[in-house]
Amino acid sequence: MAGPILAIVVPCYNEKDVLPATAQQLLEAVKRLAKSSVISHESKIVFIDDGSKDNTWELIENLCKKNPKIFSGIKLSKNRGHQNALLCGLLSVREFADASISMDADLQDDISVIDEMLNLYGSGCDIVYGVRSKRDKDSLFKRITAHLFYRFINFLGADIIYNHADFRLMSKNALNALAEYKEVNLFLRGIVPMLGYRTGIAYYERKERMAGESKYPVGKMLRFAFEGITSLSTKPIRMVTILGVIIFIISLAMIVYSVVRYFMGATETGWPSMICSIWSIGGLILLSIGIVGEYIGKIYLETKQRPRFIVEKKLGG
Ligand code: UDP
Ligand code: MG
């Protein structure tokens, strides 16, 4: 029995240094898996060129010419960022693939884990997360900032998998469900856990980048984190409301305190009333902004038009 049609989706941005090695290793993996009938012979490796400025696209073209049965390429008109490039790839492959595996072009994700992912897929998982068991090859700075980011975003109520990046298997069902999320500010790591379905985890050790440089310098990383937080959570607005309430309560306490001091005969003329009104008005303004913000948050979520439910199976008529 032939295995499922697999599509390996690889976004590439200025990856000329590493792409030949990546293509070679992926090709070997796909051939090996197809030979042992774990996957179908119609499986493909899809590169998405995210508007590279180097000759990445020419490399992809050459690969497709040499091996059109296995390689295919998509070129975006300009650099749209990792998440959009990845989404483009995932949405395109769902037409022919039974399952997709997304991974970075730099071979930091361990290709041999694909076997394990397919195993879990075979046992009924629609989504398999690749999770880094160790990331000591990443810089200390990257590890600390990543840890803080996961903690913070979980605190804000978004459900994202710790130490999982975008190395994951998704079945056709999961991809079709993902396509229902039409939002423009897309943060895949936060959306995928919302899909539900049976999920599995495949652990791997994150390696060093094979060649080339990270395409995520600090500025881009912070923007990515900010994007993730604001597209998944409206809790920061709630925090403004809470701050407003706290400040207003403090101002009430101060009014009581000033009145008590007044009856004890120890008053500085003008000062207490001044401070109390500044604090109470400040608190009330923050509270009002928070309340208005709550509505804006609701509008924000409504405009995303996320699906309200996703059907996994149906029985009967
Ligand atoms: N990437 C992309 N568009 C971008 C930036 C990055 O498609 O604007 C791709 C890049 O080619 C790589 C993946 O996203 O395949 C992850 O990037 P990178 O390895 O530089 O990030 P890091 O591992 O350093 O976080
Ligand atoms: Mg990388």
Image (spheres, rainbow, N blue to C red):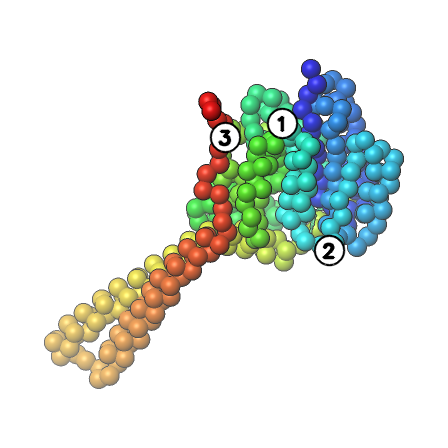
Q: Report helix, strand or loop for mark 1.
A: helix
Q: Determine whether, in the image, residue 7 is placed left or right of residue 142.
A: right
Earlier in the chain: of badge 1 and badge 2, it is 2
> Can residue 279 be seen?
no
Q: Which mark is residue 78?
A: 2
Residue drawn at 65 percent across, 29 percent down = 98
Query: Label 2: how many residues lie within 10 Å, few (<14), some (14-19) or many (20+)?
Result: few
Query: Label 3: how many residues lie within 10 Å, few (<14), some (14-19) or many (20+)?
Result: few
Q: Position of residue 237 (x, y in %)?
A: 41, 58
- How far is the residue under mark 1 from the one under mark 3? 20 Å
- The image shows residue 6, relative to residue 58, as above or below, that is above
Q: Determine whether, in the image, residue 276 is placed left or right of residue 54.
A: left
Q: What residue type is labelled 1?
A: Met
Disc 2: residue Cβ within 8 A of ligand 1's nearest atom: no
> Can residue 302 be seen?
yes
Q: Where is residue 306 in the image (x, y as percent from the top left)?
A: 49, 46
Q: Report helix, strand or loop for mark 3.
A: loop
Residue lying farthest to the front in this orientation: 317
